Amino acid sequence: MKEHPRTVATQICHRDVCTGLVCLSSLQRRVGNCAKIQMYDDGSLTNEDRVILTDCLPNSQIILRTERDEVVDEALAKYPHCRRFRHESKFATKGIDIPLTSIDEITYCDSDIYFFRSSPSFLNRTQYGSEAVFMEDIHETYNLRPWHLLGRDSVKLGSRICAGFILMRRTAYDLDLIEWVLGKYAAAFRKSPWVTEQVLWAAHAAQVRSSTVDRSQLAIIRPGERINPRLIAGHFVSTYRHALHSYSDQWEKVEEVASDEPSGVPVIRCTALRLLIDRLRTRISPS
């Protein structure tokens, strides 16, 4: 089946320019239907950063926050909680700006995901048979408590949703849902705002037919882990980012073999009990 070229969005900041160059270059080299990378500035990129990124990443574009303010603010005119979230948190770029400025499909990849092998179908949402595709997290990384998931009027979340990778039909994105979640759990979100955006995507995962990429093909990489031979890409989150160069340098010396077609695993519900067990396990063994 012919793969149509896709524009891939990513969020990038001044601190992560070097990581972004390494990882986004691997995306361009190994994902054949990546036609263009749109890098969304969170407001911290310098003029030098922008020159380096566009010079080193052919067929890429930087979208400054000021360039999208008018369109996004207009879309949020009737959503006060969303407007507040956007203007108070840099993490709203992925949860608000990128979806609202996408056309038919939301195609997103964090700038710290390194592609080890070629996979022409990786960005094709229909390959996974779902309306929304994410990657699987190690934990239930949400800033809600188990009791927040109790009761008929509580938010419904997909389990272990990591928003580092997102493929979603644009019409499945629901601003009304985001507004409701931000308002209902505002107090909880204030305590650890850096994962609020992940809760919003997990709420979407529970609303539509969703899947996560098989974790043998896309996974969070922890130092010392042996790379699964089926692995297509690894996510080097901030906690483990120091391991990126050792893995990428090592992999560049290995002869590439054809990767399997990417496949998805249906998302299950994150219940109050599941969240409680995850919290207890994390306290016993934080890693």
Image: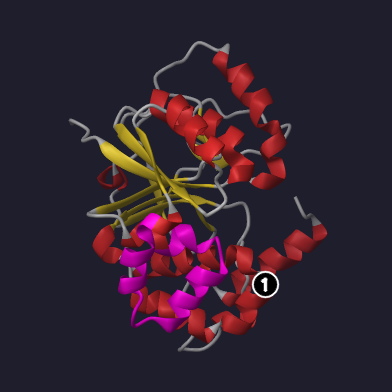
Within the magenta stretch, is there residue 70? yes
Quick one: quadrant of the N terminus? top left
Q: Name which residue lies at 60% across and 24% down.
A: 248
Q: Is residue 236 left or right of residue 159?
A: right
The magenta-colored residue range is 67-96
At mark 1, the secondary structure is helix
Q: Which of 63 and 224 lies nearest the eye of the viewer?
A: 63
Q: Quadrant of residue 225?
A: top right
**Label total for image:** 1
* Residue 232 in sight here: no
Q: Name which residue lies at 43% across and 32% down.
A: 54
For label 1, the crowd category at 10 Å Cα-Cα, with few meaning under 14, some 14 to 19 and many 20 or more, is some
Q: Which of 232 and 17 lies nearest the eye of the viewer?
A: 17
- Tell me residue 228's x, y (percent): 57, 29
* Tag 1 residue: 276
* Magenta portion: prevailing SS class: helix
- Tell me residue 48's x, y (percent): 55, 35
Residue that lies at the very extreme toward the left in this rendered image: 2
- Tell me residue 191's x, y (percent): 69, 75
Q: Quadrant of residue 145?
A: bottom right
Q: Quadrant of residue 160?
A: bottom right
Above or below, 39 against 151 in this view is above
- Tell me residue 227's x, y (percent): 60, 28
Above or below, 165 against 221 in this view is below
Q: Name which residue lies at 44% across and 76% down.
A: 82
Residue that lies at the very extreme toward the front in this rendered image: 47
Residue that lies at the very extreme toward the bottom in this rendered image: 152
Q: What colour scheme governs how the chains and residues are painted in the rendered image of this protein?
A: secondary structure
* Kind of residue at disc 1: Leu
Within the magenta stretch, is there residue 166? no
